[in-house]
Image (spheres, helix red, strand yellow):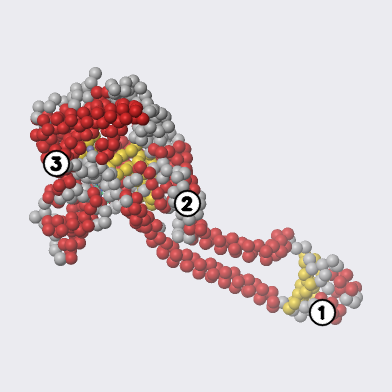
Amino acid sequence: MAKKTKKPNNNSNQKPAQNQPKKPNNKKGFGFSVHFGSTILFFLLIIAVYSIFSEKESKVTNVPFSEVASEVRLGNVKQITVSADKLEVVKNDDTKLKSKKESESSLSEALTNYGVMPEQINKVIIEVKSQSGFSYWALALLPIFLPIGLIIFFIWMLSRQMKGSGMQAFTFGQSRARITNPNDKTNQVTFADVAGVREAKHELEEVVDFLRNPQKFLDIGAQIPKGVLLTGAPGTGKTLLARAVAGEAGVPFFHLSGSEFVEMFVGVGASRVRDLFQMAKRASPAIVFIDEIDAVGRVRGTGVGGGNDEREQTLNQILVEMDGFEPNAKVIVMAATNRSDVLDPALLRPGRFDRRVVLDLPDRRDRKEILQIHMRKKPMGADVNIEVIAERTPGFSGADLYSLMNESAIMAARQNKKELNQSDLVASIEKVMIGPERKSHLLSVAEKRITAYHEGGHALLASLLEYADPVHKVSIVSRGSAGGYTLKLPLEERKLQSKKEFLDDIVVSLGGFVAEEMILGTTTTGPSNDLQVSTALARAMVTRFGMSDAIGPMALESNGGRVMFGGGVDGQYSPEMSAKIDSEVSKIMNESFERAKTLLSENKNILDAIANKLVEVENLEQDEYEKIIVSFGIKLKKKLI
Ligand code: ADP
Ligand code: MG
Ligand code: ZN
């Protein structure tokens, strides 16, 4: 389903991108017709000049050689100028004639042949002009080269006109990146325009610092990340944040959407990539931003969808360009996607998009801040309470909140009001919610409570159990398909895990399931993933790590991912063994379930406190969370050894 809803999304992203270069098109189209007109004028002018010259010539009468001969015979001719086979005859009355002779014979020979007496010839001044090389060749070659020259000139004019215009036949290899100039303050976005996403901003500050002062980093030999990948649900502000980085750093920002690389013609994408990076390197320090990179960066070689070759070539070119940066090229590539799961692993390799910045959906506090940002240019009534709006909009993305504010303003304007009232805002919540895909990730009050208990269950068990990893963050803001999440991080990196740790991990995984059962009396589909993970872990303990007493130290499966499916090629064991494994796995699971149940019901009051706080604030960072459990007398974990 997620795939289906994505498609139209992509398209809608593509459209404005393609429309953009079209606007100047119209202008260019106009300019083009002007130039076309001037070209035609130019032609007419040449024709006119030519005809004037030929007219001048036509004043001199062209006559056959026989007439020249007879004029000479009659003694009417004063002078004949010979240049090659051309004759210019000046008569005694100063009229001029033009004629030609055969080129093989000399003039006197020719005249003699026509029966002119030598004495008559002698009376005439004969001047032989050897034609100067240049004019001879010019005259000979002009008829050939003039049209060719004109054609070349014409094509040159056309291609000059079409640069940057929509005539793709001439420009398809060029990048169509939109460039934001750092000196253009009108469109500038800074971090102050982006609310929430604190971790992402924090990560990106490093990038900003580098772009502002690259020498500082280069001097000390620091290698700066080449690529930063922004991931997050649609509308969480990925594009906005990328622009903010450019605004903060004050460097040129080359912005291109992944879909713009891909055209009808094979090879265009790759050539555009080359062009884009070339431009960026020339302008360095600079940021290249490839939005919606999943359009070109999907896993290669899957054979899904046509035009696969083209996409692969484009992707390859991006990889080549990123690898080709000299260590001191001050170009940082940023990319955004909401489908990082489909990206080609090659993109995520170190040295490419090795920094990954995740943008979460905003929690209540962030939503308030985002609303405040979009309130800035709108007159607000005295009755407006942003707090309430933020509370009522769980699951809204930044883009949703932006459109909420916008809808409210439209609503107020239609009622001819001078300012926005709370009622406009409240009414707009629904309007935005009804939009096609918003409903799915909007938690109802009941769902919010269940999710809070579920995550609270995980978190509390993690704090109670000796060998579980401590809690870093608890959230009921949905992420992907999960309703919420509890982030546990080990105190230190471990290579080996003990049986006790595994058992505690399983108990923690079951915490969500148990907590839901406790408050609902039944369970939801929420914990299905928890069950999968914990069952797989229990099975691995039995079949791979020799951690079950009944089976003992035997590895029945390798770690080739067979765990979930049982048996398989390398799981060659008897049906009895299979039954034994099953019973051992279910023993572990049941014991863990009982432990989880006992612990949670013994500490129900703490669970309630955590859940209530979660319903209220949606996100609990480590220190806020620890404050709650410490107030109930739970000791925080010390570093293990
Ligand atoms: P994405 O690229 O992640 O799909 P955008 O960056 O295009 O989302 O966000 C769309 C709009 O939503 C932004 O232009 C901005 O007005 C608003 N918006 C989104 N996230 C935020 C945020 N964290 N703070 C302020 N405004 C936001
Ligand atoms: Mg975007
Ligand atoms: Zn869970």
Identify the element where label 1 is drawn: helix
On the image, which quarter does residue 81 sit in? bottom right
Q: For marks 1 and 2, give the one nearer the viewer.
A: 2
Crowd rating for badge 1 (residues with CA inside 10 Å; few <14, some 14–19, many 20+): few
Indicate left or right for 605 with 136 as reference.
left
> Residue 307: which disc?
2
| Lower sequence index among marks 1 and 2 | 1
> Residue 521: which disc?
3
CB-based contact (under 8 Å), mark 3 and mark 2: no
- The relative height of residue 265 versus residue 534 in the rendered view (above or below) is below
Q: Residue beneath label 1, please?
A: 67
Indicate left or right for 106 with 365 as reference.
right
* x, y percent for residue 62: 75, 77
> Residue 485: which disc?
none
* x, y percent for residue 436: 26, 56
- The relative height of residue 528 versus residue 422 in the rendered view (above or below) is above
**Viewer-nearest residue: 292 or 515:** 515
* x, y percent for residue 437: 26, 54
For badge 1, the amino acid type reads Glu
Q: For marks 3 and 1, give the one nearer the viewer.
A: 3
Identify the element where label 2 is drawn: loop
**Viewer-nearest residue: 213 or 405:** 405
For badge 2, the amino acid type reads Gly
| Lower sequence index among marks 3 and 1 | 1
Q: Residue at x 69, y 77 (%)?
A: 58
| CA distance for labels 1 and 2 | 77 Å
Indicate left or right for 49 with 236 as reference.
right
| CA distance for labels 3 and 1 | 127 Å
